[in-house]
Amino acid sequence: MARERSSLTRRSLLGAGAAAGIGTLAVATAGPAAAATRDADVVIIGGGLAGLTAARDLKKAGKNVVVLEARDRVGGRVLNLQVPGGGATEGGGEFIGPTQDRMKALADEVGVATFPTYNTGKNLLRKDGKNTPYATDGLLGAVPPIDVAGLANAAAVQALLNDMAKKVPVGAPWTAEKAKEWDQQTFETWLRHNAVVPSAKFLFDVACASVFSAEPRELSLLFVLFYIAAAGNETNPGTFERLTETANGAQAIRFKGGSQLVPIKLAETLGDSVVLNAPVRRVAKDGAAYTVTADGITVRAGRVIVALAPPLAARIEFDPLLPAGRDQLAQRLPMGSVGKAIAIYDRPFWRDAGLNGQVLSDTGMVRSTFDNSPEDASYGALMGFIEADQMRSLNGASEAEVKAAVLKDYATYFGDKAKTPTAFLLQRWDNERFTRGGPVAYAPPGVLTSYGPELRRPVGGIHWAGTETSTYWYGYMDGAVRSGERVAKEVLAVL
Amino acid sequence: MARERSSLTRRSLLGAGAAAGIGTLAVATAGPAAAATRDADVVIIGGGLAGLTAARDLKKAGKNVVVLEARDRVGGRVLNLQVPGGGATEGGGEFIGPTQDRMKALADEVGVATFPTYNTGKNLLRKDGKNTPYATDGLLGAVPPIDVAGLANAAAVQALLNDMAKKVPVGAPWTAEKAKEWDQQTFETWLRHNAVVPSAKFLFDVACASVFSAEPRELSLLFVLFYIAAAGNETNPGTFERLTETANGAQAIRFKGGSQLVPIKLAETLGDSVVLNAPVRRVAKDGAAYTVTADGITVRAGRVIVALAPPLAARIEFDPLLPAGRDQLAQRLPMGSVGKAIAIYDRPFWRDAGLNGQVLSDTGMVRSTFDNSPEDASYGALMGFIEADQMRSLNGASEAEVKAAVLKDYATYFGDKAKTPTAFLLQRWDNERFTRGGPVAYAPPGVLTSYGPELRRPVGGIHWAGTETSTYWYGYMDGAVRSGERVAKEVLAVL
C-alpha cells in the first residue's frame, strides 16, 4: 500500500537527452520541491535491468515496491542514443547471444524484437600497418590471418583457458581447487607464460580489452576464468569463444529500436513505482525497517535491494555501517574504462567492399568495431569501442578530439568515406556520474578469493543485485536480468 | 576573513570516546542545528596530519583556512586509545624512524617528546609450532633462526628488491624504465620466482602483511618497489629493511603521551579553524569559487584541499564531476585490512624472560607484535597487528571473539600470564566509517602505470593531500606531514 505524501511529477523514462522515436512514458520523478515519502515492502536502488527485473517479480508476487533511479532515465548501462534524422543506436549494452536466455525472455515478454548483428562479408585485420580482410566471423572462433605459429599457439591457449574455466564453479569461483593459484596472478602473467607467440598474444590482448575494457595486467586470472565459465548457462558451460564471437557468441543479436527499449518497456509496466532523478544518499536502519533517502524522496521499507555496480554502491552512506568485508569488496572492484563511438553515414558503404564492419586492430583509439546500422540499413552506422589504455589516454580530451581520433581510425580501416559521417555519437561511460566506467566492475588479483562470498551475501535486510552479482553472464545484460530474478526470489523467501 | 553566520559549539579535540590524560582542547564543531556558513581562502577536507599540516602552513602565510573533519576528533588514522587506569596507547599510526624527518620536526614544533621503542632482549620466532628466541632487532635486518638456505635466499631477495627500488623515482614510479614490466605482475608472482626457499618466502609474506596489511597477491610489484624507494628521504634512498626494522627502521621511535598528541596539539594551534563532526558530502564549483557542504556547515573558498585516503575521497559528490582518471584512480586504490589489539598487564612480564616483545609468527591471528608499554614501564602493553587475511577472517566477529583469539596467540608467544590482561583494547580500522581499512591505500597491478599521475594532479582549484600523495614515506605519518607541506606550497603558488 504505497502511500504518497507529496505528488511526484510525471516525465519521460527516456531522459532529457536520450533516445527519441519512442513515445513519452509515464513514470514518477522525484521533484526538487517538497520531498515525497513512501512506504513499500521493498525499495530497490537502481533502475537498470537488474533493479527493474527484481521490481517486476516482486510486484507479480503482490509486493509493493519503489525503484529509485538516480538518472533521468531507466536502463543504467543500457542506453539508446538518438540518431539525428531518426532512429536510435546503442551507447551501452547492446548485444545478446546464445545462452543469454533471460535477457531474451525479458525482451520477448515486453515485446522488443531482435535481429541478427550484421555479419555478412569479411572481417578486417589491421596489423603492422596493413589491412587484411578475412572470412567468417568472430575473433578467435574465426581464423584471423596471422602466422601459423601464432594461430597454433592461440588455439592451444584458448583450449587451455576453456579447460581451466570448466573447473571454476560459477556460483563460487573462490572454491575452485586451484582458486588461490589462479587468483594470485594477473592474466598478463599467465598469458606471458602461455601465449608465447607475439601474434597470439596480440589476439588475446585485443580480446581482453574488448571483453573487459581492461588490460590483462589489471585482471586476476581467476576472474578471467570465472568470466569464461559464466559465458554460458546451466546446460551449456561457458567458453572463451562465446565471449568473443559474433554469430555464435555474445555479439550475435541486436534489439529492434535499440536495447534500451527493453528496460524502458519494462519500466512502463511498473508505472510510478519507478522514480527518476532520485539519487540515493543514505540507507538507514531503524528497528526492522529501512529508511532510504534520495534527493526529493524518502522511502521506508522492510527490505532494500541495491542494484548498482559495486563501486557506486559504496558511495551511499549506510547506517549502521556495512560489514568490513562488504565495504572492502566494493573498494576492490573497479569499473573498466570504455566509450562507444558511433559514426552515422547515409549508407553502410563498407558493405560494398564486401566487409562486415568488424575490425580487429593493433593500433588506433578504436581497435574493435561493429556495423551498427539498423536492420533495414536505412542508414549506415559504424560503432567502435574505445577501451582500457585507449580510453584512459583520452582522459580530459574534448569530444572534438575524440571524434577526430576515431574518424582517423575508421578511415584507416574503411577508406576516406569514413571521414565524413553525417553524425557522430559518443558515449563515454567514464564520464557518467552514476557509472564512472564500464562495462563492468572487474576483479584484480586476490579479490575473489578474499571477498568473493560478499558479492551476494545479504546484510540484514539489504540484498545485492546487478550484473556483478550474477553467476552466469556476469558483466552482461543477461547477468543483470538473472540477478534481478535471483534477488527477487531471495527477498520473497524472507518476506 | 572568516565570517561566521551561526555559532559553532566548542568541544574536545579528542572525541567522545577517545584518549584521556590530555586536557580538553577548544575547537569548533559543526552543530546539528542551523548550518553555519564560512568564507575562507582554502577549505581543507580531513583533519588528519596532512590536512592539519597544510592548514598550519597556509595560516602562517596569512591565509584563512577551514579544516572540515568528519569525526569528533582530529588525527585520522592516528588515534590514542585510553588505557583504563590512566595513560594512552596507540590504536593507529604509532612509530617513526630514521629519515622520517618531517613528522619528527612537527612533533618537536608542537612539543611532543619521543622515546625509543622498547627493543632490549630477544625477538621471538614462532614457526612450525616452536618458539625460538633470537638476538638483535628487526625482521630481515636481524637474523631470524631459519635454515641457512632460507637466510641466504632472503638476503639475496632483499638485496634484489633494494636494487630494483633504486631504479624507481619516488616522484613518478610510472616512469621507471621497467615500470610496465614491474606493474604487470603481483608481488606474489615475483616472490615465487625469487624467494624460492620456503622459509625465505615465509619471511617476505610476514613482512608484506606487516608493512602493507595486504597479501603479496594483492600488490603490484611496482607499488612494492616504490614503497621501498619511498622509505627514505632526499639524501638517503629508501631500503626494504628501513620498512621492517625496529631500532634502525620505521618502528624505532615512539611519542610520549601517544602519537595522536601531535595532531591534537597541532590542531590546538589552529583554534576554531578546525571544525569537527563535519563530514563533507559535496564539493561544488560555481564561478571561481567552491562551495563545500558538510553536515552542519558550509564553507565557500577559492581552493579546496582534499586530505583523505583516495577511496574515501571518491565518496564525496563533486560538481562538476571529477575527471575520469581521478575517479577511476580512487576506485583502484583500496585500503588494506588492519586492526591493532593491545593487551594491558600490570607490568611487561615478558621482559623478565629476556624478550623484547617482538614476535614473528607463521600462525595465529596476530603474527607480529611489539612491546607497547609506556617509557616508564608503569604498566605492560603488548600490541599486536591483525592483518590482511587474518583481519578479513574476523569480519563479523565480536570483540570478545577477537579478544579470545588474540590472547590465545599472546599466550602461545609469552606464556599463560598473557591470558589475563587487566584491559584489552581493540581498534579495527576496517570498521571505521571514515577510514574503512588501513593503514594505507595500496595499488594492485596496473594502477600506477595507468593512473599514477592523477595522484597529485590538481583538478581546477581542487588539490590533493594525504599520505597516499607523498613521494617519501607513502603510507606513514611522515608521508602525511610531507603531503601537507607540499600541498600548502602548491596552493600558495597559485593563491
Image (cartoon, coloured by chain):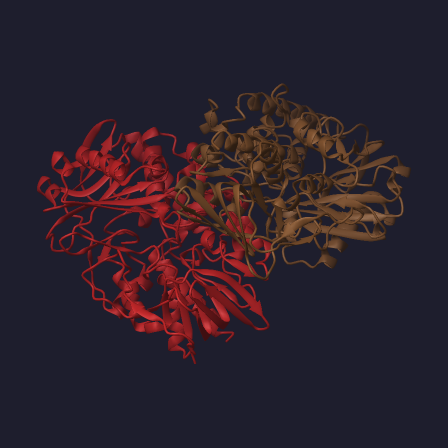
Chain colours: A brown, B red
In the displayed structure, would residue A390 be above or below residue B101? above
Q: Is residue B323 left or right of residue A268?
A: left
Residue at 54% over, 26% down = A170
Q: Position of residue A173 (x, y in %)?
A: 50, 27
Quarter placement of the N terminus of chain B:
bottom left
Of A26 and A426, nearer the camera is A26
Residue at 82% over, 44% down = A381
Of A165 and B394, nearer the camera is B394
Q: Is residue B436 visible?
A: yes
Of B376 and B394, nearer the camera is B394
Q: Splitting the image into 4 quarters, where does residue B382 fall?
A: top left
Q: Position of residue A102 (x, y in %)?
A: 66, 29
Q: Is residue B147 left or right of residue A405?
A: left
Q: Splitting the image into 4 quarters, where does residue A225 fall?
A: top right
Q: Is residue B105 visible?
A: no
In the displayed structure, would residue B393 be above or below residue A430? above
Residue at 47% over, 31% down = A494
Q: Is residue A219 left or right of residue A363?
A: left
Residue lying furthest right in this view?
A: A352
Of B161 and A57, nearer the camera is A57
Q: Splitting the image into 4 quarters, where does residue B256 fall?
A: bottom left
In the displayed structure, would residue B68 be above or below residue B396? below
Q: Position of residue B328 (x, y in %)?
A: 55, 50
